[in-house]
Amino acid sequence: MSGTTRALDMKPASTLGKALRYGGTFLAVGVGLVSYRYIAKVGPVPPNVLGNRFFAPWIVVHAAAASTALILGTIQLSSGVRQRWPALHRASGLVYVAGCIVGGASALVLSAGLTTGPVATAGFGALGVLWLHATLQGLRTARARDFARHRAWMIRSYALTFAAVTLRIYLPVSQIIGIDFDFAYQCIAWLCWVPNLVIAEACLRRGARPRADPRNEASFRGQE
Ligand code: HEM
């Protein structure tokens, strides 16, 4: 198995790998479920979010769609699900893509409505554009049956989706250590996703050119 295929399969090779995988899944599902509170209109809303110029109705649209993508992405990256239940992978993948498109489009609206300054607007705006781009490339390559590139684009897409988790780790930590909120928010608008993307890219580049794994190729045969 090549380095690329190993990375694309996201198979934990070690105890640390497993801990990261399960920890990441736990955090993603937890953040996703808690974020559904915007649909139910329960729980606290951070003051900066309340101040967003496009808060209603976009925050509910965004939280509903993006949370669904964050949760479903954990299923999409599982090579076990892909191989055993390819129909589930395809159905859940379509909902993931829809969640990213609606979540990404509404994120662009919310980015334009931020009151925390142009650096934050640019950071979240760039994240939204790249998120849409990576996800649409993932969809296009799946339709073209180029599954090695499909997996690579979807790994990039989920690395960006996962910004929802890293943001919610960095922001409270920045406040605990006493960094000014507006300054922290502007930095974290970039820090929540740039390292995620660099790590995903490094994993993908560990091998040579993307190459399809025949085991996974078989899991997509139902599309023919
Ligand atoms: C990856 C691309 C994403 C971008 C560019 C983005 C952008 C934004 C922006 C600009 C806001 C408004 C923040 C403010 O007004 O201060 C926001 C809020 C929010 N986003 Fe996203 N978002 C993304 C992904 C996600 C994901 C995957 C989730 C899933 C949980 C999510 C859940 C939320 C929630 C719940 C809020 C309301 C604020 C809060 O309670 O933390 N977002 N997002």
Image: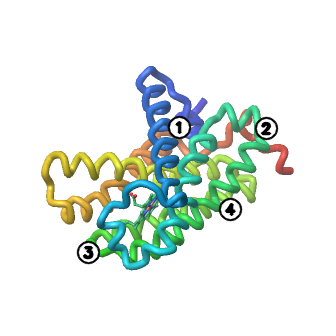
Q: Position of residue 168 (x, y in %)?
A: 35, 50
Closer to the chain start, of discs 2 and 3, is 3
- Whole-Å distance between the Cαs marked 3 and 4? 35 Å
- At label 2, counting other C-alpha atoms closer than 10 Å, the crowd grade (few under 14, some 14-19, many 20 or more) is few
Q: Does 172 sit left or right of 151 as displayed?
A: left
Element marked by disc 4: helix
Query: Mark 4: few, some, or many residues within 10 Å (few <14, many ≥20)?
Result: some
Residue at label 4? 140
Q: Quadrant of residue 52?
A: bottom left
Q: Which residue is mark 1?
A: 7
Which residue, given by chain and number where applicable, does mark 2 sit on? 218
Q: Quadrant of residue 190?
A: bottom left
> Which residue does the numbered mark 3 point to in the structure image?
117
Q: Is residue 34 left or right of residue 186?
A: right
Q: Secondary structure at mark 1?
A: helix
Element class at badge 2: helix
- Residue 98 placement, left or right of 85: left
Q: Amino acid at mark 1?
A: Ala
Measure the C-alpha gap from mark 2 to mark 3: 49 Å
Q: CA distance from mark 4 to mark 1?
A: 21 Å
Residue most extreme to the top: 15
Q: Residue at x 21, y 50 (%)?
A: 174
Label 3: few (<14), some (14–19) or many (≥20) C-alpha neighbours in 10 Å? some
Alpha-carbon span between mark 4 and mark 2: 19 Å
Type of the residue with mark 3? Gly
| Residue 78 in picture, x, y percent from top left | 62, 36
* Disc 1 packing (10 Å; few <14; some 14–19; many ≥20): many
Residue type, numbered disc 2? Ala
Can residue 132 be spotted in the picture? no
Closer to the camera in the image, 59 or 14 = 59
* Rendering quadrant holding ligand 1: bottom left
